[in-house]
Image: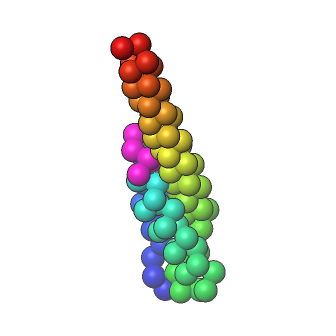
Amino acid sequence: MKPHRGTTILVLGILSLVCCGLLGIPAWLMGNADLKEMAAGTMDPAGQGTTNAGKICGIIGTVLAILGALVGIAYFVIVVLMGSAMA
């Protein structure tokens, strides 16, 4: 059996919440792949909880990063439009 990468996935997921939302993407993808391998019986299932938690943190971090980027873009557009309207 292959060893699980639950700790790595959890660290990436937490970092995506704390500092860089883009780290959530690898946590999400790695978590999906490892959970599939655990279900197939080719990977050590001892890290299933840690892997799932990291995957969920990665999903949340990715969604928050996308929402933050959209809010930033909207703010920039509004400021530019207001600036050009005042001129």
Q: Is residue 51 left or right of residue 18?
A: right
Q: Position of residue 14 (x, y in %)?
A: 48, 47
Colouring scheme, one of rainbow, by chain, secondary structure, one colour = rainbow
User: In the figure, 19 relative to 38: above or below?
Assistant: above
Residue drawn at (53%, 86%) of the image: 42
Q: Provide the residue span drawn in magenta.
A: 16-22
Q: Quadrant location of residue 69?
A: top left
Q: Is 36 situated above or below 82?
A: below
Q: Quadrant of residue 81?
A: top left
Which residue is farthest top?
86
Camera-side residue of 19 and 65: 65
Q: Is residue 17 magenta?
A: yes
Say whether residue 23 is visible: yes
Residue that protrudes farthest toward the left in the picture: 87
Q: Residue at x 51, y 62 (%)?
A: 28
Query: Residue 44 appears at what percent x and percent y?
Result: 53, 78
Q: Nearer the viewer, residue 24 or 53?
A: 24
